[in-house]
Image (cartoon, grey):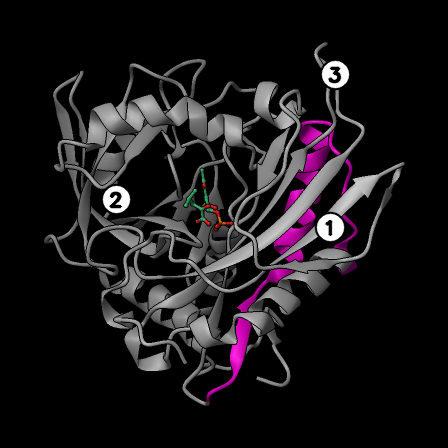
């Protein structure tokens, strides 16, 4: 076990010992390679550098109370990476290879999996990039898949603590029929300006985007999906420009399992005024309760609860964390226990 101040980890890059790589050349994926290099040797005309042929994933491994190491819904991340590859015309990594690489990199860096009591986890970052040289706008013929890990703490301030968020009307993250549904770097490039302008003053945890067409409905935050809760109902946006969050999909199932109703539909901004609780959810965000959402350009402001996480959010959070850390039964089959650790 590494000597790290686990409990005070933030969501940043902390170097670990190994990463796992796999090249796609001559029309096929090669063998998994273990590397201790943190750099990539890359052609200056590679398509990832010019035309955004890049997709990534985000998942976590948890050390449980029982000492076992659990990875959450790895197959879903593998499938979403394939969908992102389809989205920007990259070679798709077979699911078995994805899962083998993820388990390998977690095992190789077992020393960096935070202890149970610290509430930290091992963030797993797979990425797939176009490596072949092109100058015309067309897909590469060579690709590289890498997966690295880094121990992380909470993404938003304080972890399970209510924070204020802000609606940005000046910029769109993705178009209705654009790449918002894929986890590709371009979406995040498109969000950086909005994020820095809206949030780097320190007042807000993250920016929320409205649908790009009508600027009427809540889409999602720059790094997480949105949910609102009222009348025992979990409500989350239906939109063609948001990332299909695996956490959100899980929360919808958990909400049903604890007796809530679930609705997935467009959420007009004014409806925010009617929610008893609201939250941002994702692998990095887990559930980050929202105290308030401001819309500075219209002067509107929407508050939720009493500035503390609401009771439903807390129940969902405990259920999700319980499954991830092994203190609740894995009733939906979401967990892969990493053998031999
Ligand atoms: N939305 C965006 C834009 C994200 O970057 C993420 C993070 O992955 C999410 C939503 C949450 O998705 P997931 O729960 O699969 O991590
Ligand atoms: C995640 O939740 O895994 C993300 O990718 C969000 C952000 C760090 C991009």
For residue 266, what is the image quadrant? top left
The answer to whether one can see residue 177 in this image is no
Where residue 136 appears, x then y in whole percent?
72, 9
**Which tag, 1 or 2, sits closer to the chain's start?**
1
Specify whether residue 23 is painted magenta.
no
Q: Nearer the viewer, mark 3 or mark 2?
A: 3
Specify whether residue 91 is painted magenta.
yes
Where residue 35 appears, x then y in whole percent?
63, 58
The circle on residue 39 is: none
The answer to whether one can see residue 122 in this image is yes
The CA span between labels 1 and 2 is 46 Å
**Which tag, 3 or 2, sits closer to the chain's start?**
3
Q: State the SS at label 3.
A: loop
The residue closer to the viewer here, 276 or 141, is 141
The residue labelled by disc 3 is 138
Q: State the SS at label 2.
A: loop
Q: State the SS at label 1.
A: strand
- Residue drawn at x 53%, y 20% is 176
- Which residue range is magenta in the image? 67-96
- Residue drawn at x 22%, y 23% is 197
Q: Is mark 3 within 8 Å of ligand 1?
A: no
Where residue 106 appears, x then y in whole percent?
57, 69
Locate residue 334 relative to residue 149 in the image: left or right.
right
For residue 33, what is the image quadrant? bottom right
The residue labelled by disc 1 is 22
The circle on residue 275 is: 2
- Identify whether 88 is placed above or below 248: above
The CA span between labels 3 and 1 is 22 Å
- Identify whether 253 is placed above or below 335: above
The residue closer to the viewer here, 210 or 269, is 210
- Are the residues at dot 3 and dot 1 in contact (C-beta closer than 8 Å)? no
């Amino acid at each position: 076990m590494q000597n790290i101040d686990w409990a005070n980890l933030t969501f940043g890059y902390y170097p670990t010992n190994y990463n796992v790589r796999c090249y796609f050349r001559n029309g096929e994926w090669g063998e998994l390679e273990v590397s201790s290099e943190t750099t990539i040797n890359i052609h200056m005309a590679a398509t990832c550098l010019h035309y955004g042929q890049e997709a990534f994933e985000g998942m976590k491994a948890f050390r449980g109370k029982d000492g076992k190491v659990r990875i959450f819904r790895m197959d879903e991340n593998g499938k979403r990476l394939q969908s992102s590859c389809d989205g920007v015309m990259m070679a798709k990594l077979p699911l078995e290879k994805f899962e083998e690489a993820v388990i390998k990199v977690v095992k190789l860096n077992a020393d960096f999996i935070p202890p149970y009591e610290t509430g930290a986890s091992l963030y797993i970052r797979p990425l797939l990039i176009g490596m072949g040289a092109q100058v015309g706008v067309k897909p590469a013929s060579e690709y590289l898949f890498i997966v690295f890990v880094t121990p992380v703490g909470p993404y938003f301030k304080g972890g399970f603590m209510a924070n204020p968020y802000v609606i940005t009307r000046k910029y769109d993250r993705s178009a209705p029929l654009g790449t918002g549904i894929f986890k590709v770097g371009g979406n995040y490039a498109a969000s950086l300006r909005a994020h820095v302008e809206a949030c780097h003053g320190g007042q807000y945890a993250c920016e929320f985007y409205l649908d790009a067409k009508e600027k009427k409905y809540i889409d999602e935050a720059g790094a997480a999906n949105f949910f609102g809760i009222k009348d025992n109902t979990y409500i989350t946006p239906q939109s063609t420009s948001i990332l299909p969050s695996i956490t959100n999909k899980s929360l919808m199932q958990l909400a049903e399992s604890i007796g809530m109703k679930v609705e997935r539909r467009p959420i007009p901004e004014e409806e925010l005024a009617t929610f008893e609780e609201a939250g941002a959810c994702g692998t990095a965000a887990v559930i980050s309760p929202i105290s308030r959402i401001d819309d500075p350009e219209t002067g509107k402001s929407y508050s939720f609860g009493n500035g503390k996480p609401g009771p439903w959010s807390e129940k969902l959070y405990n259920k999700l964390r319980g499954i991830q850390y092994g203190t609740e039964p894995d009733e939906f089959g979401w967990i892969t226990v990493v053998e031999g650790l």
